[in-house]
Image: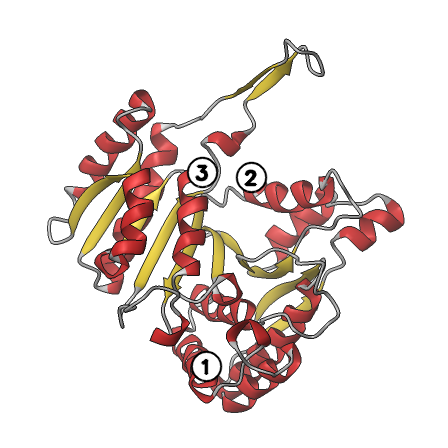
Amino acid sequence: MKRVAVIGGDGIGPEVVAAAVPVLEAVADKHGLHVALDSWDLGADRYLRDGTTLPAGERDRLVDEYDAALLGAIGDPRVPSNVHARDILLGLRFHADLYVNYRPCRLLAPSLCPLIDAPHEIDIAFFRENTEGLYAGVGGRFKAGTPDEIAVQESVNTWKGVERIVRAAFEHAARAGRERVTLVDKANALVHEGALWRRVFDEVGDEWPEVRRDAVYVDAMAMDLVRRPERYEVVVASNLFGDILSDLGAQITGGLGLAPSGNIHPGSWAFFEPTHGSAPDIAGTGTANPLAAIRCVVLLLEWLGCSEAGDDVEAAVVASVEAGVATPDLGGTATTREVGDWIAARV
């Protein structure tokens, strides 16, 4: 029996998760998988109700008692500081040491790409370092609120942190039959950080001589993802660069509404969430695209060792796009729930 915690979260999060869960249940039933789904009350509503974000005891239970979690979205304008989002998301990432942020960006149909003369094949796996870099929170402010205010944010890069995310990228390339891994950095300006990343990239890459490797500056990469995205297969980058570029990768493959992600510690624990935000402006309208959340089910099933079931879900997602069963952002008229129900029935 596999146990999965289901966290709707904020905004459109509960809606897209409610569309994804029946898909997971349908494919589990089809393949004879025993998956127990437990709902967890975490998000802005609970924080506004009793001041609770993610207590240490509940955090430990999530990681210790569940194989993984499926999360909708976290973020609510009623909590201007977003303290609940920080405690839940960063709390889980750092407590469970989820050092891999895995963001696959695959073009399901050429019509979804905003580029003129869109390539038929765009399939990029982004491996973003998830626990270090500029997001580590090292730094501070001095003389805050005065004309002399100083803000310092340090980018933290350890050999251990860089080595394990680079290794994860090469392992994925070898496992998935990818021919190239690309490192994205800014080594000409961030010379100390860049020197570490490039040394580790070459040392680890030498273990996979059959996988080609190259390094591209982040500004050139942003340009090249628009110019020739079909060139890239597996991309590995620091926390900040990976965050930015994977959003660009999502946009050229149809938008954030189709883009899943995994926060993963290989062999330990993981949670899966759409890359889109909570979009409170459309919450409750039934127009949120559930495909990113449903494709998170694909990643979740792969994590649970049920790749064949995940393939069935991905095939049903592609079929929904081809059939025009889509929410308004993709030019359709279906509601969030209708898309989910169609895919569950297709599975």
Please, is residue 269 above or below residue 82 in the view? below
Q: Which mark is residue 94?
A: 2
Colour logic: secondary structure
Mark positioned earlier in the residue sequence (2 or 3): 2
Q: Give the spatial CA distance, label 1 vs label 3.
A: 31 Å
* Residue under the image location 58 percent in, 82 percent down: 339
Q: Which residue is mark 1?
A: 321
Q: Position of residue 282 (x, y in %)?
A: 70, 65
Which residue has dot 3 on it?
A: 240
User: How far across and down, in percent of the image, does residue 312 sit?
Assistant: 42, 82
Look at the picture and state if 41 lies above or below 326: above
In this image, 47 relative to 271: left or right? right
Q: Secondary structure at mark 1?
A: helix
For the residue pair 331 and 275, the one nearer the viewer reads as: 331
SS class, disc 3: helix
Give the residue furthest to the front. Answer: 116
Q: Residue at x 65, y 80 (%)?
A: 337
Residue neighbourhood size for the residue with mark 3, other residues' Cα within 10 Å, grouped as few (<14), some (14–19), many (≥20): some
Task: Measure the alpha-carbon separation of dots 2 and 3.
Answer: 16 Å
Q: Residue at x 45, y 81 (%)?
A: 321
Q: Nearer the viewer, mark 1 or mark 2?
A: 1
Residue furthest to the left: 209
Residue 267 can be seen in this image: no
| Residue 12 seen from this side | yes
Q: Amino acid at mark 2?
A: Phe
Horizontal relation, residue 22 to residue 113: left or right? right
